[in-house]
Image (spheres, rainbow, N blue to C red):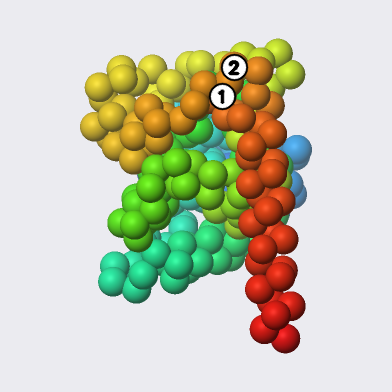
Amino acid sequence: MVEIATQAGAVARARVPLNRTRVLSAAVALADEGGVDALSMRRIAQALGVVPMALYKHVANKNELLDGMIDVLVGEIDPPVEGIGWKAAVRRRVLSARRMLLRHPWAPEVIEARMKTRAAPTPALLEYLDSMIGIFRAGGFPIDLVHHALHVMGSRLLGFSQELFVDNDSGRPADTDTDADSLEPAEMAARFPHLAELAMAVAHDPESVVGSGCDDQFEFEFALDLTLDGLARLLNAS
């Protein structure tokens, strides 16, 4: 009876049209259960009651699967709140991102790895970063200060603390077969205007390890001085 019920459940799942959203949702659920290292197309197919080859109509390979999973998670972050000031708005979104990552403890490793190997962040991640830059700009920050703020905050914008703005070992992206990477400059500017403004404004240092167009020494000292100034302010207030 149990075997019959299992088969009936698989048939019922198979009757629901398979799409990219279902594939990604199943992948996220499996990663939540067993970690991303245990994730495979075979296991996702079993969860969905389909053959593994059916998945490749919706995700071309493992990297595209991981990128799509990242976008699903970014979609869980609360949208920006209007009228509360830049500091409160940034804090609310960052803490929302952290709550999301606590629900999905495998995510920081995947986000960090994919950020290092892609030519650009995933589309949803680009949209999130663009909106965060927009909050700073609406709060009166000049574009160069926004640039430095992004480096100081690093991956805290996404709820954890690793440096995201780095190149891979070769200095070149490992894969470039994703939607955001193939956008024309005009389309990028229209879709992500704040990121486009930032990209046009930063200085160019091709040897940078913290990110293309960044001055490593300046960013290091900027973050150091900001931290020391903050500690001094807290000491004086104590």
Q: Residue at 28% across / 71% down in the picture?
A: 83
Q: Residue at x 69, y 22 (%)?
A: 168
74 left or right of 6 in image: left
What is the CA distance from the residue labelled 2 to the residue labelled 1?
A: 6 Å
Which residue in the protein does label 2 denote? Answer: 206
Res 212 label: 1
Q: Tell me whether the residue at label 2 lies in contact with that at label 1, contact meaning CB atoms closer than 8 angstroms.
A: yes
Q: Badge 2 local density, few (<14 within 10 Å), some, or many (20+)? A: few
Residue 159 x, y percent position in the rendering = 61, 57
The kind of residue on which mark 2 rests is Pro
Q: Nearer the viewer, residue 63 or 164?
A: 164
Give coordinates of residue 101: x percent, y percent.
62, 57
Label 1 is placed on what type of residue? Ser
Crowding at dot 1, Cα within 10 Å, few <14 / some 14-19 / many 20+, comes out as: some
Residue 195 image offset from top left, x and y in percent: 38, 36
Query: Quick check: 213 above or below 105?
Result: above
Quadrant position of the C terminus in the picture: bottom right
Task: Say above or below: 8 vs 182.
Answer: below
Residue 184 point in image, percent of width and height: 30, 17
Compared with 16, 173 (above or below) is above
